[in-house]
Amino acid sequence: MKNKDLHNFDTLDYRELIPRNGFIFKFRKKDNRFVHTFVEGSFITDAITPSSTVVGHTLEDFLPQKQALEKLTYYERAWNGESVTYEGQIDDVQYVASLNPMMRDGQVMEVIGTAIDISDQKRSETKIQELEKLSVVSELAAGIAHEIRNPLTSLFGFTQVIKEHVKDDSIQDYLDIMRNELDRIDDIVNKFMFIAQPDKTMNISECSINSIIASVIKSLESQVAIKGIKLNLHNQTMITAECDQSLIAKVLKNLIQNALEATNENSGDIEVSLKDINQQHYLIQITDKGSGMTKERLKRLFEPFYTTKEKGTGLGLMIDRRIIELHQGIIDFKSEVGKGTEVNITLPKVLKPK
């Protein structure tokens, strides 16, 4: 709808204009404030806010101050006779809105707005962007892994030879440090190799998920003891599923270690739960009450090379998600600063053939 000079806009049936998966609204300027006079549509009632909190109210009445101020700019432009289109987001809902002035004798009497939920489209765009980034990183990873692997193997060998021939304990200490640092480099190279060719490293078999989780928790006992907290395992049922045992264990170990790093003895215990969702899927949940994460950090969690750790590579969570996706599953994070983090991993019991 374009802005029009109408004499009968009060009699229009606005319900006919409601977009599918969207809503329509109207507002007028009264006493220098924009007051909403009408709103209807499933989007507004299901996804954002009840219509009763919109009609008769201004933006400042039901939106956070920052969002209200931003939208006031668009409202003002529309009230001055300009057709305005903008994108916005409320909670997890992303939308595109259009404001169209309705005029009488050249004077704006009312503005009609329409909003359409575009969350699915935005998620698709984000996924495409992530795949493009992953493609670039994969090419980079393949090149780096190839260039580093051969000289790294030589360094491992020479370090071992020197260690066997040197009797000075102080030199031995330095050689141990060198070996530890070479192991770190080797771990990074292995991550690059996985990113470059993840499918080639998978070894799928029928596994006890309970045993995998228990083994990971056992391997972290010393780290848990140092922290002075408890790592509690909740098994609701015995679950057997198709997976690569070592890769799933790798993901769980990394996620639990992240929870340990975010938690101290005053924060509370870390909970690891295994739940049977239905005949096809199961859920692994890791919950801590640690430092939590900001919304900005949550958005960037899976970006390659993004890390807040002093010695982090920014590849760990990216690889974790890649492993879960290769297992046809979903990994999801919920977090709040100062309250902790919840990680949910949903996986199928039987993998679909490719």
Image: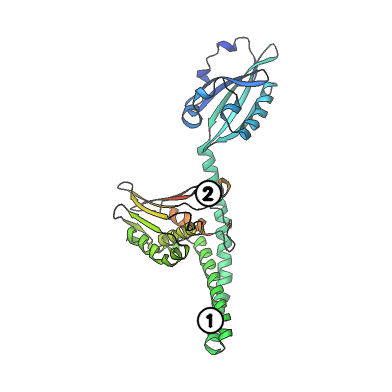
Residue 82 vertical position relative to residue 344 in the rendered view, above or below: above
Name the spot of residue 312 as percent of width and height, x first. Answer: 57, 62
- Residue type beneath disc 2: Gly
In the rendered view, would you say 264 is above or below 339?
A: below
* Secondary structure category for the residue under label 1: helix
Gap between marks 2 and 1, in whole Å?
47 Å
Q: Is residue 349 left or right of residue 129?
A: left
Crowd rating for badge 1 (residues with CA inside 10 Å; few <14, some 14–19, many 20+): few
Amino acid carrying mark 1 in the image? Gly
Residue at numbered disc 2: 338
| Scheme of image coloration | rainbow
* Residue 216 percent location from the top left of the image: 40, 63
**Residue placed most toward the observer, 346 or 147:** 346
Q: Residue at x 46, y 57 (%)?
A: 255
Quarter occupied by residue 142: bottom right
Residue 166, position as x, y percentages in the image? 56, 89
- Residue at 56 percent across and 75 percent down: it is 152
Residue 282 place in picture, x, y as percent: 35, 50
- Residue 69 against residue 126 in the figure, above or below: above
Side of 303 where 213 appears, left or right: left
The quarter of the rendered structure image containing the N terminus is top right
Sequence-first disc among 2 and 1: 1
Q: Is residue 40 visible?
A: no
Is residue 142 in view? yes
The correct choice, above or below, for 4 with respect to 275 in the image is above
Name the residue beneath numbered marker 1: 157
Can you tell which mark lies on residue 315? none
Q: Residues within 10 Å of mark 2 (few under 14, many from 20)?
A: some
Element under disc 2: loop
